Amino acid sequence: MNGRSQFVPTEGRVVALCGGVGGAKLAVGLQHVLGERLTVVVNVADDFEHLGLHISPDLDTVLYTLAGLSDPQRGWGRSDETWNFMDALKQIGGETWFLLGDRDMAMHVERTRRRLSGESLTAICIDIARQLGIRSAVLPVTNDKLSTMVDSTEGELEFQRYFVGRRCEPVVKQIRFSGAQDACLSEEVVASLDAEDLHLIIICPSNPYLSVDPILAVPGMAEKLRATSVPVVAISPIIGGQAIKGPTRKIMDELGLEPSNAEISRHYAGLLDGLVIDITDAAGAGDLGVDVHPVPTLMTDLQSKITLAEHALAFGDSLRATHKRRIRPLRSEAHHDKT
């Protein structure tokens, strides 16, 4: 890297709200720039019990990615993975619809062991991040059970059954977050959002409906974003009317939503001060109700991840310098039901 292309803050902390693959890519760039000044708050509504093990797909994707252990081809799991466990499981008639690599199994077995011994998911995650040499803080949004449920043309499906088992094929009618009303933000997440040196909050380009909304569904999170004195900036997952990764475009179509930056801005209405969009969409940005920053948002390698992180940080810094905080209205819940 030959110097930074953008001015970025040299002090203060940044909190990033993050799902899996897309969010983790930006988190890598943010960690490169900020190091220990970054806190990544991760969705856990994808978590489920499988083969007696506690599986945390988004948390693991973020941990593996920040530690440089993720598989760049698959986009999930660990690199240099082997599949002897799955082969042996298939041989004896076990469930093989959800793939667990041999290296990946260590994470699930150790997490489950420690959970059964009484440790919180947060404590386990903090320790594993330290063991893996991750400089930034990685925090599950809650220690409580939270589950994404997809109401589809095949009935209600747990998220992993929809996403992995059925490969997102059923048509989505509605999405709800079971357990959200009774969940609590972890003490560590609250402390990160209340920190005196908090500089900026970033919503990563994760799927708004499956990855970010579960984070916002935990009581207190949306309220903290509305009340914070620092800018809140989101990176749109839409480029030219398409989502680069995952089922974002498919879900938007099935929910009757326009696949556009305008819809992303509406979805996060009341929470944002700024929206980073791809430079190819600059001409059609119009009035999105927030400040817009068009830059290249496609992350194909480490440099592009770092550059996008720098752009987001510089944009947030400009909002701090030129704008007073808006009074945010209540966020619309029109497109999903949280229970």
Image (spheres, grey):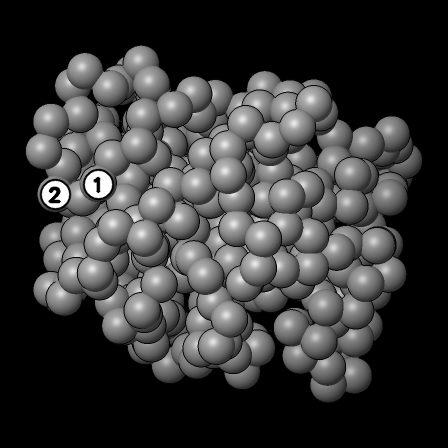
Of discs 1 and 2, which sits in the foreground?
1
Residue 330: % across, % down: 13, 66
Q: Mark 2 falls on what kind of element? A: loop
- In terms of depth relative to the viewer, which is nearer, 328 or 91? 328
Residue 154: % across, % down: 32, 40
Residue 120, relative to residue 319: is it above or below?
Answer: below
Q: How many dots with numbers? A: 2
Residue 180: % across, % down: 36, 71
Quarter assignment of residue 199: bottom left
Q: In this image, 215 relative to 277: left or right? A: right
Q: Residue at x 26, y 18 (%)?
A: 281
Give amino acid for label 2. Gly
Q: Residue at x 70, y 23 (%)?
A: 2
- Mark 2, Cα crowd under 10 Å, few <14 / some 14-19 / many 20+, is some
Residue with the mark numbered 2 = 289
Residue 6, relative to residue 157: is it above or below?
Answer: above
Q: Residue at x 80, y 39 (%)?
A: 69
- Mark 1, Cα crowd under 10 Å, few <14 / some 14-19 / many 20+, is some
* Quadrant where the image shows the C terminus: bottom left
Quarter assignment of residue 234: top left
Quarter assignment of residue 77: top right
Residue 71 seen from this side: yes
How far apart are the two marked residues, 1 and 2, measured between alpha carbons?
Answer: 7 Å
Residue 254, relative to residue 24: is it above or below?
Answer: above
- In terms of depth relative to the viewer, which is nearer, 40 or 95? 40
Residue with the mark numbered 1 = 291
Residue 246, relative to residue 329: is it above or below?
Answer: above
